[in-house]
Amino acid sequence: DAKTTQPTSMDCAEGRAANLPCNHSTISGNEYVYWYRQIHSQGPQYIIHGLKNNETNEMASLIITEDRKSSTLILPHATLRDTAVYYCIVRSRRKAAGNKLTFGGGTRVLVKP
Amino acid sequence: DTGVSQDPRHKITKRGQNVTFRCDPISEHNRLYWYRQTLGQGPEFLTYFQNEAQLEKSRLLSDRFSAERPKGSFSTLEIQRTEQGDSAMYLCASSSGTKEQFFGPGTRLTVL
């Protein structure tokens, strides 16, 4: 699976949008971009995923560049409960790949009042 | 609660002892995964099952580790002759086919 690069940490003001970047310049055409987050002492939580189109759900929006080499996770109105480590993961679509997730270091997001 | 559950949540053991963890996946999920997470790092894949078949094992899974999913429902992860380096959070996840994985709360193992 392609590697991803994320900033180590970032702060965000409560109520503002949080934009989390991720570089995946070696992504191939049959790989998805997934985002998970992990709140302290909990298991990772699925947020959203996409292939090449932008995606939105009740938690966040995912913007993928046209060349697919980078993406941005947008939390539209950050709350204190969004403080967590956010992981950007590239995963193969191929069934034979087994669906395992390869986590990097993630971005530690601190939402401040 | 119909999420992934893990038992126990915390385990303290002495070096050399055997430990076993249990994971109950979301009902009807045919895939079950085990990951390990050490302090300050992201989770690392250990192994996964499709129904009762163990289809992939990471090189991290030494011969002291064994995982089973006998009836394609719950799974157990056993560590024999524990070492201090085995201290970590052990996470279980499940999915329906290749769809998104849902994680349990984890079992935190401390080896003294």
Image (cartoon, coloured by chain):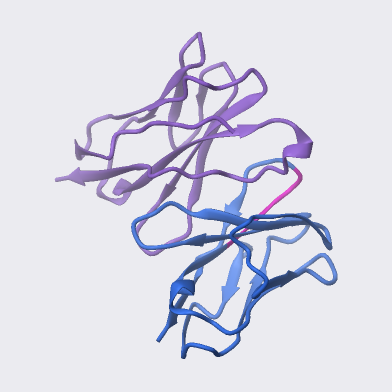
Chain colours: A purple, B blue
Which residue is more in the foreground, B92 or A48? B92
In this rendering, does residue B64 appear at all? yes
Measured as percent of width and height from the top left, residue A87 is found at 43, 41
Query: Which residue is drawn at the image coordinates 47% and 36% (left, top)?
Result: A58
Q: Residue at x 54, y 80 (%)?
A: B8
Q: Position of residue A8 (x, y in %)?
A: 28, 40
Q: How many marks?
A: 0
Relative depth, front residue between B84 and B35: B84
Image quadrant occupied by the N terminus of chain A = top right
Residue B88: image quadrant is bottom left
Q: Is A83 on the left-hand or right-hand side of B9?
A: left
Q: Is residue B112 above or below residue A26?
A: below
- Pinpoint residue A102: horizontal percent, then vertical percent: 54, 43
Where does the magenta region start and end? B92-97
**In the drawing, does residue A82 fall left or right of residue B102?**
left
Q: Is residue A63 above or below residue A104?
A: above
User: What's the magenta bit mostly, secondary-structure-wise?
Assistant: strand
Question: Outermost residue, left direction?
Answer: A113
Q: Which of A113 and B17 lies nearest the eye of the viewer?
A: B17
Of residues A28 and A48, the one drawn nearer to the viewer in this rendering: A28
Res B84 → quadrant: bottom left
Magenta includes A50? Answer: no
Asked if residue B29 shows in the view, the reply is no
Quarter occupied by the C terminus of chain A: top left
* Residue shown at 39% from the left, 31% from the top: A5
- Looking at the image, residue B55 sits to the left or right of residue A5; the answer is right
Rendered image quadrant of residue B60: bottom right
Indicate left or right for B44 with A113 as reference: right
Residue B57 at x, y percent in the picture: 70, 56
Q: Name the residue rendered at 76%, 45% in the picture.
A: B97
